Image (cartoon, rainbow, N blue to C red):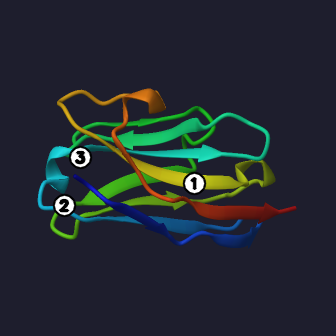
């Protein structure tokens, strides 16, 4: 069982930066592949970035490439999403999620545990 709590969201102007954190409970955090997803009003939840349990592999959505960086600190049971050069279209609720097993996945259907989400609003 893993419980996830996101933080770090807020209101920022276009071009600004935010760093999201996701704190996980449980001693087996290091065994989980972690992902960040987001959902804008009226839209489906979409993949943003994932990182494997070992941090050896990361995958980004095209919309995040070059602007967002996912990282994790297994000693602190925390995964991060550094978001730079934010755009109004990045406005959404951002969720972190955990997936057991050895393979990473970009589809949310494969994730077992979810946080409650943190709101990111980017003003133009």
Please provide percent x and percent y for residue 5: 41, 66
Outermost residue, front direction?
A: 1
Q: Which residue was labeled with disc 1?
A: 94
The mark total stands at: 3
Res. 117 visible in picture: yes
Residue sitting at 26 percent across and 55 percent down? 2
Q: Position of residue 118 (x, y in %)?
A: 58, 63
Q: Earlier in the sequence, mark 1 or mark 3?
A: 3
Where is residue 73? Give x, y as percent: 24, 63
**Residue picked out by circle 2:** 74
Secondary structure under badge 2? loop
Of mark 1 and mark 2, the one earlier in the sequence is 2
Q: Residues within 10 Å of mark 3 (few under 14, many from 20)?
A: some
Marks 1/2: CA distance?
21 Å
What residue did someone put label 3 on? Answer: 55
**Secondary-structure class at tag 3:** loop
Q: Earlier in the sequence, mark 3 or mark 2?
A: 3
Residue at 67%, 34% in the rendered image: 44
């Amino acid at each position: 069982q893993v419980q996830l709590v996101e933080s770090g969201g807020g209101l920022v102007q276009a071009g600004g930066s935010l760093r999201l954190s996701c704190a996980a409970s449980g001693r087996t955090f290091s065994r989980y592949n972690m992902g960040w997803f987001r959902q804008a009003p009226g839209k489906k939840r979409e993949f943003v970035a994932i990182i494997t349990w070992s941090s050896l592999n990361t995958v980004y959505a095209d919309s995040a490439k070059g602007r967002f960086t996912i990282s994790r600190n297994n000693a602190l049971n925390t995964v991060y999403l550094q978001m730079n050069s934010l755009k109004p279209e990045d406005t959404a609720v951002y969720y972190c999620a955990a997936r057991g097993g050895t393979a990473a996945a970009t589809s949310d259907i494969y994730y077992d545990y979810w946080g409650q989400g943190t709101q990111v609003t980017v003003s133009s």
